[in-house]
Image (tube, rainbow, N blue to C red):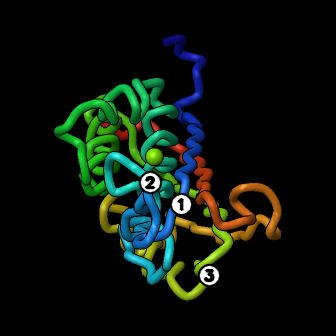
Amino acid sequence: MSNQAPNIRVGHGFDLHRLAPLTGSVEHGKPLVLGGIRLVSEAGPIAHSDGDALLHAITDAILGAAAMPDIGQLFPDTDPKWAGAASEGFLAEAAASVKKVGWSIANVDATVILERPKLGPHKEDIRKNIARILGLHVSQVNIKGKTHERVDAVGEGRAVEAHAVVLLTQSRG
Ligand code: MG
């Protein structure tokens, strides 16, 4: 790395999971968990792990900022080891990996796009939970909730989508 290279890195993450009714359909969704918080919903993600699109997007943003392999490479959905896995473990491991090579997380900003249920009432719980997992102050984590205005798969309630950006700074010492 050149001495002129700035000691900050930005990372971006995206994830989408299809949603299906929890019961009564051929393809069952899993309980809807976003940011590690269980939401009351008639539909949930079709996923190998717990299908937490928000934590997956943040995990990829952290790994991406450090130019590390992505979540699909580190925790492949073909590996039975990760079946039903809580995504908190993926996020914590990504944070530990970048810390090991000298980066600190400055902040996380993320957007969840979900038609229902409304994310608003859960945003603070989600922020606090992500801050806890990453060892950050809650002011370093921001979560926004949007709908998709009833159009396309997300708007029709057939998928949930999450986008995240993360800033890393070089740790001292
Ligand atoms: Mg995912």
Q: Residue 95 carries which label?
A: none
First in sequence, mark 2 or 3: give its number: 2
Exactly how many numbered labels are in the figure? 3
Left or right: where 111 falls relative to 149: left
Q: Where is residue 125 in the image (x, y as percent from the top left)?
A: 43, 81
In the image, 17 versus 169, the foreground residue is: 17
In the image, 83 versus 130, the foreground residue is: 83
Q: Do the residues labelled 1 and 2 touch (CB within 8 Å)?
A: yes
Residue shown at 41% from the left, 55% from the top: 51
Residue shown at 42% from the left, 71% from the top: 22
In the image, 118 versus 94, the foreground residue is: 118
Determine which residue is flagged by label 3: 118
Residue shown at 37% from the left, 40% from the top: 171
Q: Residue 19 carries which label?
A: 1
Is the CB of the residue bearing disc 3 within 8 angstroms of ligand 1?
Answer: no
Residue shown at 37% from the left, 70% from the top: 31
**What element does badge 3 sit on?**
loop
Q: Position of residue 49 (x, y in %)?
A: 32, 50
